Amino acid sequence: MDELLALRRGMVVFEVGAGSGYHAATVAEIVAPAEEDPAEWGHVYSAEIVPSLARKAWSNLRRAGYSDRVTVLAMDGSAGFPLGVRPDRILVTAAAPGPPRPLLDQLKVGGRMVVPVGEPSWWGGQVLVVIDKEDEGRFRQTEITPVAFVPLRGKYGWPS
């Protein structure tokens, strides 16, 4: 997924679904490498709808030395990025019914979102999708490969 995002140093990335924090750390290694000048760093904002998982992800990231490059937010990430910054990249780590509209709207022009889309099932029906924002309201969508992810929860996810 990191490769599909076409990450570069200095980018702002919004991740929906922090889990353990591991994926946010891999993204931070690319957009804010520790050995580079912090003035050139990007930042990873990782939203987690389950408060106990958000706390665990933050604890893991802090202990591993990422607290200056990753911020964990306990919130419904499907509803959008709350900080008034338009992310360069959006990574959704749970299968959505469709690309969440608030995320598409907030993505920078020239930005990219990677999202698994499809029914919450381990038996198929999901596909990993790359969406490039070509202009305001204009997107190019490419289906990459079949996948199996947990269902996205929240306002623009699947009903609980």
Image: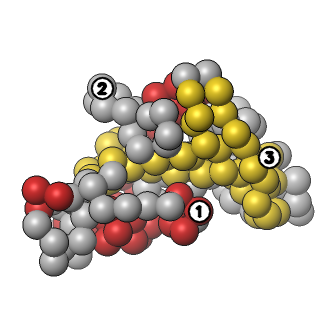
Residue 96, image x, y percentages: 69, 42
Mark positioned earlier in the residue sequence (3 or 1): 1
**Picture coordinates of residue 157 (x, y %)?**
65, 35
Q: Quadrant of residue 124?
A: bottom right
Q: Nearer the viewer, residue 34 or 8?
A: 8
Q: Which residue is mark 1?
A: 4
Residue on which disc 2 sits: 84
Crowd rating for badge 2 (residues with CA inside 10 Å; few <14, some 14–19, many 20+): few
Image quarter (top left, top right, bottom left or bottom right) of the N terminus: bottom right
Mark toward the viewer: 1 or 2: 1
Residue type (three-letter) at the residue carrying disc 2: Gly
Judged by depth in the image, the label closer to the viewer, 2 or 3, is 2
Horizontally, residue 74 falls left or right of residue 153, namely left
Compare marks 1 and 2 and give the one earlier in the sequence. 1
Categorize mark 3 by other alpha carbons within 10 Å: few (<14), some (14-19), many (20+): many
Task: Report the amino acid beneath label 3.
Answer: Gly
Kind of residue indicated by mark 1: Leu
**Looking at this rendering, what residue extends furthest in the top direction?**
137
The residue tagged with tag 2: helix, strand or loop? loop
